Amino acid sequence: MRIKKALVVFLFSLSFLIVSESFAKVNCTGVPKEVKIWGDEMAWVAVSLRYKPGPFLVCSMNKVHGNKTPEQCKGMYSMLLGAALTSRQVSLNYSNLNDCSEVPVASGAAIKELDILTIH
């Protein structure tokens, strides 16, 4: 029971941390149709949104990428899985892009850092 409570507190804290970061320039919103771990030694979390190109690479489960630690990434992975299972919209926010077509997809493009992940 103690572990469950600690996990819930951690996930809520993580969601506030992710949402409280600076406002992003690009907001790509949709319902996840697929969430998975993508390929190489970085173990990227990838999400495909309905009616959007993708999958979008979100963070790395194995190494720090930008300011996201593997622990934060595991929390985001859990949040994305929950959103996919309940058909809830998510927003991927990036500050250094012009539109959603520039979001890094799992095709070898340079990986842009996700600023904010929001579950609606």
Image (cartoon, helix red, strand yellow):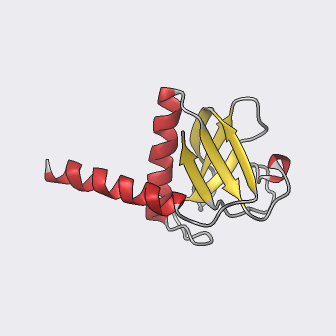
Across and down, in percent, residue 87 comes to: 54, 27
> Which quarter of the figure is the C terminus placed in?
top right
Res. 30 image quadrant: top right
Looking at the rendered structure, the number of numbered marks drawn on it comes to: 0
Closer to us: 105 or 17: 17
Across and down, in percent, residue 101 comes to: 84, 47
Across and down, in percent, residue 78 comes to: 45, 45
Q: Is residue 45 visible?
A: yes
Name the residue rendered at 79%, 56% in the picture.
108
Across and down, in percent, residue 84 comes to: 53, 32
> Taking 118 as reference, is 55 left or right?
right
Name the residue rendered at 49%, 38% in the picture.
81
> Taking 108 as reference, is 38 left or right?
left
Closer to us: 25 or 49: 25
Closer to us: 96 or 41: 96
Res. 48 image quadrant: top right
Q: Is residue 61 visible?
A: no
Name the residue rendered at 62%, 72% in the picture.
66
> Taking 25 as reference, is 82 left or right?
left
